[in-house]
Image (spheres, rainbow, N blue to C red):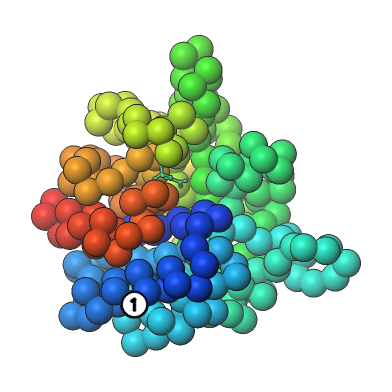
Amino acid sequence: MTRRAAIVGNWKMNGLKAQIAEARALAQAFSDGLPDGLISAICPPATILAQLAEAFEGSPFAAGGQDCAPQASGAHTGDISAEMLADLGARYVIVGHSERRADHGETDAQVRAKAEAAQRAGLTPIICVGETEAERDAGRAEEVVASQATASTPDGALEAGAILAYEPVWAIGTGRTPTLDDIAAMHASLRTALGGRFGDDAAAATPLLYGGSMKPANAADILAINGVDGGLIGGASLKAADFGEIIKAYATI
Ligand code: PEP
């Protein structure tokens, strides 16, 4: 079967209004479209999401949020609901990024509630999972990732088009990546775990992205791994030229 593939940029807490120039450059560079079968989105800070969505109008790129509250509205000072992201033009939202799990103590149950909120608002959740270095060193990486993925993914989410991203915590922003064999093994075991919990057909249809220090120099090798259906890109998504090179690398595989 042919699964969708996705290359998604996560700008994290980077970018003032001037950063929208990079989105315009991307839209310009790919005005003829993206490689066949590929979808692509940028998830900027919420403060510039509306401008980014506007810059992408008429382009093949979509806008996404980096997090959402489980609730649709109410007395939750500082939080942003999935409905609000959708109202600004978002079509995707990252949930359960390891920085949110670490900095804000988000649990699998909270991540699951956020993924449910995304679906309620008509957004596609990108559910992030990944082991710490200590968990990998202890030989527990696959078990940890399987447990996070099955507990963070709502029932019915895969059938509705949810995307998962495997992001080893120790590879994020460090310049280090797992070996290609380790990524392949993790994606295979993650898909098996999703199949065991949600059914093999749903698991087989779900895009599993890799994230963690992906850049133009390693993108083609990582994207060519069997079972890797694209990437979630942090640092290398901030410059249109680098992100564009990663998209072009996908086209070569
Ligand atoms: C991320 O934070 O999702 C990520 C993959 O970051 P980087 O590409 O910078 O490692």
Q: Residue at x 71, y 48 (%)?
A: 110
Quadrant location of residue 243?
Answer: bottom left
Q: Determine the residue positioned at 22% across, 74% down.
A: 30
Q: Is residue 58 above or below residue 188?
A: below
- The residue identified by callout 1 is 24
Instruction: Give the left or right position of residue 186, taking residue 52 as reference.
Output: left
Question: Where is residue 211 shown, x and y percent of the image?
Answer: 39, 43
- Left or right: 52 in relation to 93: left
Q: Nearer the viewer, residue 236 or 63?
A: 236
On the rendered structure, is 104 left or right of 216?
Answer: right
Residue furthest to the bottom: 58
Of all residues, the one furthest to the right in this rendering is 75
Q: Check disc 1 and give the amino acid type.
A: Arg
Write down which quadrant ligand 1 falls in. Answer: top left
Please identify the residue farthest to the left as the structure is shown.
Answer: 252
The percent position of residue 191, horizontal first and vertical second, equals 41, 40
Q: Position of residue 238 (x, y in %)?
A: 38, 58
If the image is split into quadrants, where does the N terminus sit? Answer: bottom left
Query: Picture quarter containing residue 179?
Result: top left
Relative depth, front residue between 46 and 231: 46
Q: Would residue 109 be visible to someone looking at this image? A: yes
Quarter residue 240 falls in: bottom left
Looking at the image, which residue is at 60% across and 70% down?
Answer: 47
Q: Secondary structure at mark 1?
A: helix
Residue 226 appears at what percent x and percent y?
23, 41
Q: Nearer the viewer, residue 52 or 143?
A: 52
